[in-house]
Amino acid sequence: QVQLVESGGASVQAGSSLSLSCVGLGNTFSKWSLAWFRQAPGREREGVASIDTFGHTTYADSVEGRFTISRDNAVDSLTLQMDNLKPGDTAVYFCAAEEKEWVPGHLKDYEYDNWGQGTQVAVSS
């Protein structure tokens, strides 16, 4: 198990950039597949981006080209760089982890057993 703590959420205007961070406590990240999910009010949780232990990344179509996921195993951290934010990106963003080198369903929430509490991102037009 690993405790995940997100930070970096804020209220911004459309077109702005934000960087979300997630740190893992109690375990090392190097052998874990990691991902970001988000949930908007009244909507189901959806996968945003994932990165496996080999550095292979997967993105949702809605964020491809605007968001970048990265990991730093040396400090057990996961980052989501979000550029050109849109009002549709408004949601609570969650960090997720699974102790596997890779997972077949990169952006499927059932693949991940460890979750953070979330950080709020609000984008106004």
Image (cartoon, helix red, strand yellow):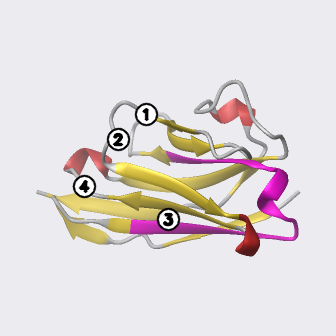
Element carrying mark 4: loop
Q: Residues within 10 Å of mark 4 (few under 14, many from 20)?
A: many
What mark, if any, has residue 119 been given in the picture?
3
Residue furthest out toward the front? 54
User: Are circles 2 and 1 on residues that touch, CB within 8 Å?
Assistant: yes
Taking the spot 71% from the left edge, 24% from the top edge, the residue there is 104
- What residue sits right under mark 1 in the picture? 60
Separation (CA) of disc 1 from disc 4: 14 Å
- Of marks 1 and 4, which one's residue comes earlier in the chain? 1
Q: Position of residue 2 (x, y in %)?
A: 83, 61
- Label 3 and label 1: CA atoms lie apart by 19 Å
Q: How many angstroms separate mark 4 from mark 2 (CA)? A: 9 Å
- What's drawn in magenta, residue-wise? 19-37
Mark-to-mark CA distance, 2 and 1:
6 Å
Residue 90 located left or right of residue 44: left
Give the answer, above or below, for where 6 lies relative to 65. Answer: below
The residue beneath circle 4 is 85
Pointer 2: what residue?
63
Query: CA gap, disc 3 to disc 2?
Result: 18 Å
Q: Nearer the viewer, residue 8 or 77?
A: 77
Q: Identity of the amino acid at label 2?
A: Val
